[in-house]
Amino acid sequence: MGNGRLSGSTGPVNGALSAALAVPASGRASAASTGSMSDRLSAASAGSAGDSSQALPLDSLRVHHTQALVNIVDRALDPDPIDAARLGAALVELRRHLESPRSSAHGHPATETSAAAVAERLLLCWVCARAAQADAHNYDMNRVVETADRQLDRFAAIPEAVVSEAIQCVSYLATMGVGAAAVARTSIPVSLVLALALTGSAGVHTCALRALTKLCTKHSVRRVRAGARWEAETGLHAVLDALARAQAALGLRSRFDPVANQAHSFAAEVAAAAALPTPPPQPQPQPQPGPEPRAAAERAVASALAFVNALVDAHPTAPERLRVRKDLLDTPLCDAMQMLDGPSVDCPRAAAEMRHFRRAYRDDIRACDPQHGLCAAGDSADKD
């Protein structure tokens, strides 16, 4: 998974990422720059600072608090080597701040944009560093590979738990006023899709899929006024573009393979665990370090199915939704759902997402061909 050879890859992974991670021409400067962003971030919010001698309302102070936390995360990315504990603590504080309802209701465009830029820098550099390590493993180089300019090497040591915190910050940004559009205009969506292929961590997969789900959920993608025009809703288009870029970079057969392959792997873990005999209860069970593996796999596969449903539902017409479903069912995703459909598998959230997929699939078939007969048994099964 993480360090193994990627299925269908036609060449070195790291060499193909530059095109996949390229930010559109309408974007900004590259987030891969290793110089400090603090000055630029402070300048971005300077317009809202006002006269420091005046008493600022609490909402304005909260915006400045958010910017300060963003600056702390940005500065934590500068040292060589990166202090993972310090970076993780800074991301936890930022995530807790962003998840507050007041942060969502009283955000500021400059602060949300700068937060997206810092998250982009971290995820882009981490994905490139992980790809370099995957190349080293694929060519049996039993050492940590160094990139040509060594600017990204220090990001390879960032733990997956820290990356998960950064992705959770992205998820909260995607629900804010301009956060969704700010994230969609960066390389974050393609970094999230590539992360699905470059790591086998259930935590990273769950967080990345939830962030992608929010980006292509119609209600969380706002229209953003830029100058004298309204930009189109960009969340769904950014996710589809990310899937296509990842397919080209990794040489995959289908653009949905990064999601489907890992969903199949986690579904196999859940099904295998369900087939094992139930262990006898222990009088005093010992606490287990970290999350229970089956529970983590269940969350990952359920998040994959939720992302699939959101992606399909975001398409406006039934014919478009049917085309996307056809492409999805040509991947291992179909086998994954069949594995989870057995009576011995107890995964309620995944079961609910599969019911939604089947019900919406049936409705789209009827919308395209009202004369097509579908058995009544399927209707009663969906209502159970």
Image: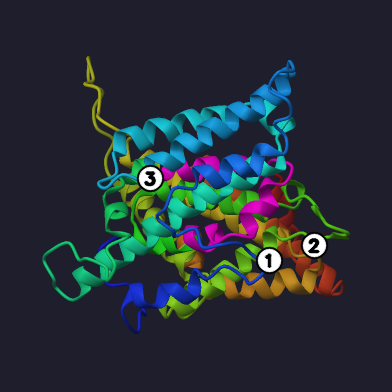
Q: Residue at x 37, y 35 (%)?
A: 88
What amino acid type should be assigned to the residue bearing mark 1?
His
The disc placed on residue 253 is none
Crowding near the residue tagged with mark 2, few <14, some 14–19, many ≥20 C-alpha atoms within 10 Å:
few
Q: Which residue is mark 1?
A: 237
**Residue 95 at what x, y percent from top left?**
52, 33
Residues at marks 2 and 1 touching, judged by CB atoms closer than 8 Å: yes
* Badge 2 or badge 3: first in the primary sequence: 3
Depth check: 329 or 205 in front? Answer: 205
Depth check: 377 or 54 in front? Answer: 54
Please tell me whether mark 2 or mark 1 is closer to you in this view.
Answer: 2
Q: Which residue is mark 2?
A: 232
**Please, is residue 179 above or below residue 363 in the view?**
above
**Residue 43 at what x, y percent from top left?**
62, 43
**Farthest bottom residue in view:** 10
Please tell me whether mark 2 or mark 3 is closer to you in this view.
Answer: 3
Q: Residue at x 33, y 55 (%)?
A: 200
Q: CA distance from mark 1 to mark 3?
A: 30 Å
Residue 234 as seen in the image, left or right of residue 260: right
Magenta-colored stretch includes residue 136: no
Residue 157 as seen in the image, left or right of residue 364: left
Depth check: 294 or 222 in front? Answer: 222
What is the span of residues highlighted in magenta in the rendered image? Answer: 163-192
* Badge 1 or badge 3: first in the primary sequence: 3
Q: CA distance from mark 2 to mark 3?
A: 33 Å
Q: Quadrant of residue 173?
A: top right
